Image: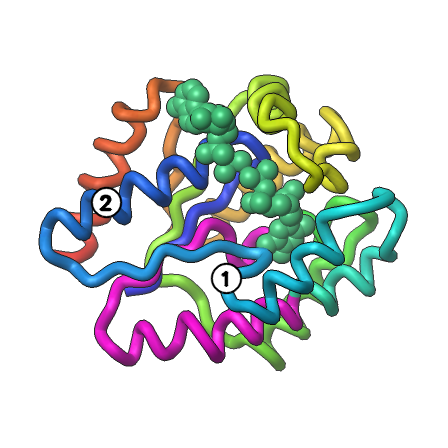
Amino acid sequence: MFITFEGIDGSGKSTQARLLAEHLRASGHAVVLTREPGGSPGAEEIRRLVLEGDPDRWSAETEILLFTAARRDHLERVIEPALRAGKIVISDRFADSTRMYQGVSRGDLRGVVDKLHALMIGREPDLTFVIDMDPDLGLARARGRNGTEERFEDFGADLQRKMRAGFLALAAEFPDRCRVIDGNRPAEIVAAEVAAVADGALS
Ligand code: ADP
Ligand code: TYD
């Protein structure tokens, strides 16, 4: 089973992906916990190119190519081998992030994102948790981490609001695989709901 976590920056995806991996491992499953952009050595190199530096460093079109190149490497070298070996793969972000960030943040490029996805990736997760979160709280949490990967956080609160609405619309577009989870609650409460949904999907 291929499980992804999506949502705005600071919504708690990394925390929930880690807690779900721990929960499933404790139940005896073999789990690969990974992330995007990155997740394989080549894709981690691309991660540095896309997440660091000036917000205007790349055009939206170039970004689509870079994120898709990173995803293709991650898929070939990490995700597909693990799924073939019968493991559960949990990825902190996947193609829905490109649909949102490159597809709607700077003009309407969703059609380009979808074509490139069909051509080069062609796989959807079995289950996607969309962690919903107040945009201002998410931004405050993300900025609280104080890292160097701030290219997208520099786009600010308006983008966070647009992304939040976009992720909710995306969940409605793919109702079979998406579950919206309220992230404005203590991490353990959120994790219990996520674990219950995943257990249900696995049984
Ligand atoms: P994301 O991966 O979506 O950016 P993180 O899991 O890295 O989010 O969480 C961002 C910050 O918020 C971290 O400092 C984390 O410890 C904190 N955090 C995560 N989940 C919660 C929660 N449910 N309540 C309060 N703080 C949280
Ligand atoms: P991530 O490390 O998950 O950041 P956060 O923990 O703050 O949510 O992702 C870094 C940034 O990369 C995030 O702002 C979203 C962006 N991103 C895209 O723009 N397109 C993509 O395809 C992916 C996977 C991420």
Q: Quadrant of residue 169?
A: top right
Which range of residues does the magenta coloring cover?
68-97
> Spatial distance from mark 2 to mark 1, Cα to Cα?
18 Å
- Crowding near the residue tagged with mark 2, few <14, some 14–19, many ≥20 C-alpha atoms within 10 Å: some
Q: Residue at x 27, y 25 (%)?
A: 188
Dominant SS type (magenta): helix
Q: Which mark is residue 22?
A: 2
Picture layout, residue 54 above or below residue 49: above
Could you tell whether 49 is left or right of 116 in the image? right
Could you tell whether 97 is left or right of 61 in the image? left
Q: How is the structure coloured here?
A: rainbow
Q: Residue at x 64, y 37 (%)?
A: 163
Residue corresponding to mark 1: 39
Q: Is residue 132 visible?
A: no
Q: Pick the residue in front: 197 or 55.
A: 55
SS at circle 2? helix
Could you tell whether 84 is left or right of 141 in the image? left
